[in-house]
Image (cartoon, rainbow, N blue to C red):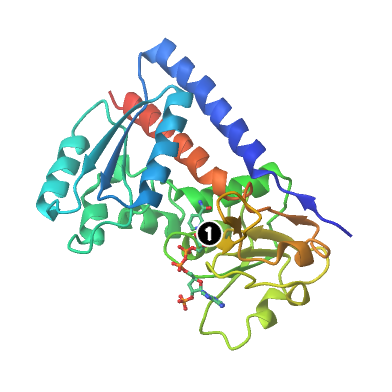
Amino acid sequence: MQSDLIDGKLISQLIKDEVREQTAALRAQQNVIPGLAFMLVGEDPASQTYVASKERACEYCGFHSTTLRLPESTSEEEILGRIDTWNIDPDIHGILVQLPLPKHVNEDRVIEAISPRKDVDGFHPISVGKLVIGQECYLPCTPAGIQELMIRSGVETAGKHVVIVGRSNIVGKPIANILLQKAAGANAIVTVTHSAAKDISIYTRQADILIVATGRVNTVTADMVKDGVVVIDVGINRVNDESRPKGYRIVGDVDFEGVREKASMITPVPGGVGPMTIAMLMKNTYQAAVRSSAQR
Ligand code: NDP
C-alpha cells in the first residue's frame, strides 16, 4: 500500500485565500484592516527568513503589518516598552515576537507582556491555560495547523488513539491538549511519549494517528507503526545532500519512504505541516481583528 499524501501546501493556500476574502469583506463592511506587528531582535538568519515569509503572507491576505528590527544588544526593558506600545495601539490586532530572543532577555517575561487579546502566537500562559480547560483562545499556530490539516483531509480523530512523540511547549504539549478536548475535530485518546521512554515503539505501534515532533531524523521507521496509521510529521531537519544546489535537503522526523508503505495517509516534508503555521497565524490575526471590531 502507498499512502495518500496530506497536502499542506494546498490546504494552507486555501486557508490564506479564505482569510484574504474575509479580510476584504471586513474592510469593506467595517473599515477594519487586520494589523500584525512583528519584533525581530538580533541577526539570526532563520528568524529573518521566518519573519519575511510572515510579512509576505500578511501582504497576500491584505493585512497591515509592521516589523520592528532591533539589535542583538537591545535591553529587555526596551523590548517590554515596545510591546506595551503595541498593546494599546488600536491598529495592531496581533503581536508576534520572533523567538529565540538573545540570551540576556527573559523570553517568558516578554511573552507574558503581550496582551492575551493580541497573543496570536498562542504562547501566553493565559492562552495556554484556556486551551487546557477548553475555553476559546488563540491556539498556537503549528498545532492548530496540524488539527486543521486533519479536519480538511477527512481524518477522524474522535475515539482514535493519537500518539504524539515529543512534549515541547510549542508542538507536543499543545497538540495533545487540542486533540484531547471534547470538541469537534478532537475528542481523541491521547498518549504523549518523549526521550525518557526506553522504547517509543511500544507506543508508536499502537497509534491510529501518529504525530512526530522531535527534531531528530528517522525517529520513526516503518517497523514502528501499524498498517493504516495516519502520520503527521512535524520535523524540519537539514541533511547534507551534494546533489542539491544548496548542498542539503529538508527532511522530517519520520522515515518517509519506509513509513508511507504502511500508512494510510502521511504528510510530506517539506509541504506538509510547515506551510500551515503561517496560514494559522493569518487566521488568528483575522480573528483578533474581528474580535476587536466587535468591542468598539
Ligand atoms: P524540541 O527540541 O523543543 O522538543 C523535542 C521533543 O522531542 C522533546 O520533548 C524531546 O524529549 C523529544 N525527543 C527528542 N528526541 C527523541 C527521541 N529520540 N525519542 C523520543 N522523543 C524524543 O522541538 P520542537 O517541538 O520545537 O520541534 C520539533 C520538530 O518540529 C523540529 O524539527 C522543529 O524544527 C519542527 N517544527 C516545525 C514547525 C513547523 O512546521 N512550522 C514549528 C515548530 C517546530 P524531551 O522533552 O525528553 O527532551
Which residue does the image show at 25% across and 59% down from the upper left?
Answer: 107
Disc count in the image? Answer: 1
Give the quarter of the figure containing the N terminus: bottom right
The kind of secondary structure element at disc 1 is: helix
Q: Which residue is mark 1?
A: 175
Residue at the farthest right position: 1
**Looking at the image, is 198 positioned above or below residue 255?**
below
Q: Nearer the viewer, residue 163 or 243?
A: 243
Q: Is residue 259 left or right of residue 277?
A: right
Q: Nearer the viewer, residue 74 or 129?
A: 74
Residue at the farthest top position: 28
Give the quarter of the figure containing the C terminus: top left
Q: Nearer the viewer, residue 10 or 87?
A: 10
Residue 210: % across, % down: 67, 65
Residue at the farthest bottom position: 198
Which residue does the image show at 69% across and 44% down from the upper left?
Answer: 7
Quadrant of res 158: bottom right
Q: Is residue 102 left or right of residue 74?
A: right
**Looking at the image, is 39 positioned above or below residue 62?**
below
Residue 125: % across, % down: 31, 58
Q: Is residue 107 left or right of residue 12?
A: left
Identify which amino acid the numbered label 1 is placed on.
Answer: Ile
Q: Nearer the viewer, residue 44 or 262?
A: 44
Q: Is residue 295 left or right of residue 218?
A: left
**Looking at the image, is 224 positioned above or below residue 52?**
below
Quadrant of res 222: bottom right
Residue 74: % across, % down: 14, 51
Residue 291: % across, % down: 37, 31
**Looking at the image, is 180 positioned above or below residue 200?**
above
Q: Is mark 1 within 8 Å of ligand 1?
A: no
Which residue does the image show at 62% across and 31% down from the upper left?
Answer: 14
